[in-house]
Image (cartoon, rainbow, N blue to C red):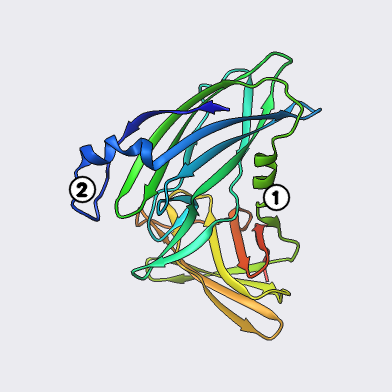
Amino acid sequence: MVRIFISATIVFFLLSGLKTSVLANKLNDIIEVNLLQGWREDNGTHISGLEIILAPGWKTYWRYPGDTGIPPQFDFSNSYDLKVLRVMYPVPKFTWEDGFRSIGYHNSVIFPIIIQTNSAEVPTLNGKVDLGICKDVCIPASFTFSSNLLPIYAKDHKIENSIRNLPERGREKITCYFTPVKDGLRISLSIPLLDQEIQNVIIELENPNSSVETPKINRIGNQFKISANIITTTGGPISVKRSEVMTTIFSDTVTSEFKGCYPP
């Protein structure tokens, strides 16, 4: 385990009268971040993990933070002799505060990191993560970390448990179509009736200039009908490819991710 060192902290807005200097001095009491070494698979893939431990009452965010918040932003560009394939996000919790939806984690979370090593040498993982952490105030915090990834083959149970808490890959076929609306598009999805009741739906797009509002969910016949408006931050035309639509469905017993959607 390698302790991560804080590189910068800035308060971006306050919900109370606390001063920025006070918050900055107390950051170490709010959050602890550790890089978990992980293990090497036989095919050369290395499984690592970034552990976030929060003080009681504090939270951080999922890759889609909801109506407010800052999603984690990872940068591994200064790493040596490896390629980070992806960072994985365990199933988050939904909370509602003053009518706004928040999606994230309380207490602790481990983000598994899937890495492809490029040779038999010991690669170096150099990374940076920007996080938003919130309680009565919200603080963007930046952390840097570095570690040589040794070829250890014993698995880390903490990372394994986090991997077990990842969303499942959805098996049902989702269809979708788009209709123009004021200031954007509306996406309408249909999914065959599931064994579980849908509690929440998140629709994500790869276009960084577009966002999707909170979807509406209706049960019609043997289908769930899901619709939401797509808006653009630039005010320009919106182009959406069906293959780039990511739908995450949260039910009472399982969370499933669906990559892409098909014409009706």
Task: Report the Cα–Cα distance between label 2 and label 1.
Answer: 39 Å
Residue 173 percent location from the top left of the image:
73, 66
- Tell me the quarter of the picture where residue 142 sits: top left
**SS of the residue at dot 1?**
helix
Position of the N terminus by quadrant: top right
Q: Nearer the viewer, residue 52 or 46?
A: 52
Amino acid under disc 2: Leu
Q: Total label count? A: 2
Q: Is residue 37 above or below residue 68?
A: above
Position of the C terminus by quadrant: bottom right
Q: Residues within 10 Å of mark 2 (few under 14, many from 20)?
A: few
Residue 259 falls left or right of residue 29:
right
Amino acid under disc 1: Arg
- The residue under label 2 is 18
- The residue under label 1 is 164
Q: Nearer the viewer, residue 88 or 205?
A: 88
Q: Nearer the viewer, residue 169 or 30?
A: 30
